[in-house]
Image (cartoon, rainbow, N blue to C red):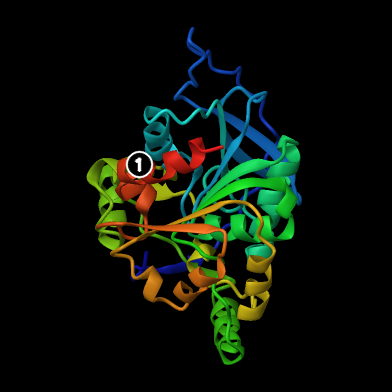
Amino acid sequence: MKRNVKKVKAVRSRRLKPKPLRKPARESAKGAMSREPRRRYFIHDGLRLHYWEWGDPNEETYVFVHGVRDQGRSWDPFLAALLARGVPIKHAVAIDLRGHGDSEWPATSRGYQHEDFLSDLAGLLKHLDKEPLTIIGHSLGGSMCMLYAGAFPEKVKRMVLLESLGPFARADDEVPNIMAERLKGRDYVEIPFPYDSLEAAAKALQKAFPLIPDDAALHMARHGTNYKGGKYRWKHDPILRYRTTTAMSEGQIEAFIRRLQCPILFVYGTESGFMKSVRGPRAKLFTNAKIVPVAGAGHHIPHEKPAQLADIVAPFLIKD
């Protein structure tokens, strides 16, 4: 989301002491997974990271990883749609990556490279101590899932990638400008204007992503903002508006793709332009992937068309 905004001094978050965990929500008499998640925290790389947990930790785990400037509760409508279609999910977790949602921000802006987000995912999976796992990622989260599955092929049972075939590669002559942009924005970052209401925050989100329906945008605003001083502000670190300085080459990304072993489902929106982007041609490299479009969807498929997406993903997850 791009806005013309006033530059002000960035305020880094203070370290917080871990809070006591809430008691698990009761499951229904039939053993169905509760729709209300529990807050969970773990310490990784010096940060207190947050994730949402549904269901019984003793059951098979499904891990959901959000995109940039998003957060874990954005998965709610899609997860509900999967359960409604009979996907036997009895335990699910959705991480808030560093600088997002209710996870801490790094002490400096240098903590937001792709390897840092990948480390968050690896830290969560180590914390859960369960493998192999089903991992589902959107955009940035999908890139982290793909890199993790390439680094540890034996630890991933199956993978769903939504509008993601790995991170952007950086051409050699592109990196200096990205680095300069980041350095100029290191001390002074673009702080979003505060909003008077959740509805105003939701409308701002829809201005950037007009295909997100009203109810989904309001849900994202409700869980993705903090209320302080009579105003609503997005929870994510504003430095995330700058491009990452990670300079991974196309050849390096393709090396990760060649190491993938698990079944893969890749889903893209016909209105997003993803397949026409520089990453689109990578689809032919995924020899073990099923590739399916969602008609009329843009980049935010889980938020825009959760029911249609679930119709595609459910058979893939139910299949042994």
Q: Residue furthest bottom?
A: 173
Does residue 212 appear left or right of residue 250 in this picture? left
Point out residue 37 in the picture as x, y percentages from the top left corner. 51, 27
Q: Quarter holding the C terminus?
A: top right
Name the residue rendered at 50%, 28% in the picture.
88
Q: Is residue 305 above or below residue 111?
A: above
Q: Is residue 208 above or below residue 123?
A: below
How many numbered markers are drawn? 1
Dot 1 falls on a residue whose secondary structure is helix
Q: Quarter holding the N terminus?
A: bottom left
Q: Can the viewer see residue 223? A: no
Q: Residue type at mark 1: give it.
A: Asp
The crowd level at tag 1 (other Cα within 10 Å; few <14, some 14-19, many 20+) is few
Of 16 and 47, nearer the camera is: 47
Point out residue 55 in the picture as x, y percentages from the top left corner. 56, 24
Name the residue rendered at 63%, 30% in the picture.
60
Q: Label 1, on which residue?
A: 311
Point out residue 313 in the picture as x, y percentages from the top left corner. 43, 44
Q: Is residue 11 above or below residue 315?
A: below
Of 198 and 315, nearer the camera is: 315
Of 98 and 134, nearer the camera is: 134
Of 41 and 84, nearer the camera is: 84
Image-quadrant location for residue 173: bottom right
Name the residue rendered at 63%, 72% in the picture.
253
Q: Can the viewer see residue 84? A: yes
Point out residue 303 in the picture as x, y percentages from the top left corner. 35, 47
